[in-house]
Image: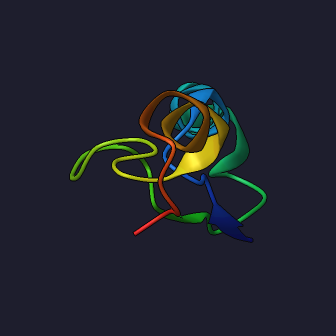
Amino acid sequence: LLVDGANGIGALKMREMEPFLRSELQVVLSNDGSSGKLNHMCGADYVKVQQKAPQ
C-alpha cells in the first residue's frame, strides 16, 4: 500500500496503524511529516495572510 501522507495528520495516524497492517500489507508511507514544514510558503492561510502566491 503506497500512502502519501501529505505531511498532515493522516500521516501520523497511518504510522500508528502500520504495525497492525504489517501482517497483511506492506505499507510505504511518503510525506510523513518527518522532514520539511507543512504548508511552508503555500496553502490557503499563507495566501490569505501574506497576500502572495504560493511558492
- Relative horizontal placement of residue 49, taking residue 25 as reference (left or right): left
- Relative horizontal placement of residue 39, taking residue 26 as reference (left or right): left
Name which residue lies at 26% across and 45% down.
Answer: 34
- Relative horizontal placement of residue 55, taking residue 30 as reference (left or right): left
> How many marks can you see?
0
18 relative to 41, above or below: above
Residue farthest along the front direction in this orientation: 51
Q: Nearer the viewer, residue 26 or 43?
A: 43
**Colouring scheme applied when the structure was drawn:** rainbow
Q: Nearer the viewer, residue 39 or 14?
A: 39
Q: Nearer the viewer, residue 20 or 13?
A: 13
Percent position (x, y) of residue 47?
56, 44
Percent position (x, y) of residue 28?
54, 69
Percent position (x, y) of residue 23?
68, 52
Q: Nearer the viewer, residue 53 or 2?
A: 53
The N terminus: image quadrant: bottom right
46 relative to 25, above or below: above
- Relative horizontal placement of residue 21, taking residue 47 as reference (left or right): right
In which image quadrant can residue 8 be found? top right
Percent position (x, y) of residue 55?
39, 69
Name which residue lies at 21% across and 52% down.
Answer: 35
In which image quadrant can residue 33 be found? top left
Residue farthest along the left direction in this orientation: 35
